[in-house]
Image (tube, rainbow, N blue to C red):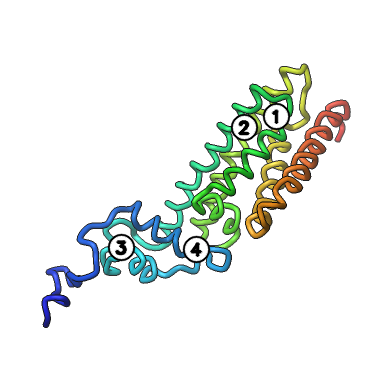
Amino acid sequence: MSPRTELHADGEHAAGRKATISREDLLAAALKLIGPHRSVSTLSLREVAREAGIAPNSFYRQFRDMDELAVALIDLAGHSLQKIIEAARQRAATDRSAVRGAVEAFMEQLRADDKLLHVLLREGTVGSDAFKQAVERQLRFFEEELRVSLIQINAAQGIVLREPALVAKAITRLVFAMGATAMDLPRERDPELIRELTLMSRMIIAGSRTLVAEPGL
């Protein structure tokens, strides 16, 4: 056996593979492989290991299986949602149009994101139950943060919302559904999408305000 193909004690080849690997390295490798026509749920362990430059057996030092990697990827994507929330709150403090500011923050993060937000938008209905539950957990987090913001913004104007949690859920699901479509559209369409999303979100909020006077519904 030549020195280039010499095996380590654990059975790995010395040449062309990294001696050590981190969870972050494997997550980065998975992100490189996914795209418009590839879902996280379709990736194989061997593909990710090859992209990361390690032997397949080394994968298990960081993750139990591909499901665990996928869930870790979704949890990491939650940071993208936090950035959107923080940006939206900053704009709400300086801009009268809090809804438009939030939509703009979402679109900016979508374009600037390193595929993490894309994972949440595109793949929430595929993969294992654990994967779907991880996506749903991040969506519920976003909805709760939005619920709190909606209550605060409207209360400052002396306005009460009917079922603010449901309002937050409706807006979140709307924005995520249209965001999934926006990923495949050119950036030139962003102003149009922002206008439509802003108007639809305001319609939802206006409906909630109106229904306060109709408790029987």
User: Tag 3: Cα neighbours inside 10 Å, few (<14), some, or many (≥20)?
Assistant: many
Which type of secondary structure does the marked residue at label 2 adopt?
Answer: helix
| Type of amino acid under label 4 | Ile
200 with respect to 89 (left or right) = right
Q: Nearer the viewer, residue 157 or 3?
A: 3
User: Tag 4: Cα neighbours inside 10 Å, few (<14), some, or many (≥20)?
Assistant: some
Mark with earlier residue (1, 3)? 3
| Type of amino acid under label 1 | Ala
Does residue 210 lie above or below 199 as drawn? Answer: above
**C-alpha gap between disc 1 and disc 2:** 7 Å
Residue 187, horizontal then vertical, whole percent = 66, 52
Q: Which mark is residue 88?
A: 2
Residue 216, horizontal then vertical, whole percent = 87, 32
Q: Which residue is mark 4?
A: 34
Q: Nearer the viewer, residue 52 or 10?
A: 52
Which mark's residue is nearer the viewer, 1 or 3?
Answer: 1
Mark with earlier residue (1, 2)? 2
Which type of secondary structure does the marked residue at label 4 adopt?
Answer: loop
Q: Which residue is mark 3?
A: 59
Q: Do the residues under discs 3 and 4 have CB atoms within 8 angstroms?
A: no
Q: Do the residues under discs 4 and 2 have CB atoms within 8 angstroms?
A: no
Does residue 162 lie above or below 127 as drawn? Answer: above
User: Tag 1: Cα neighbours inside 10 Å, few (<14), some, or many (≥20)?
Assistant: many
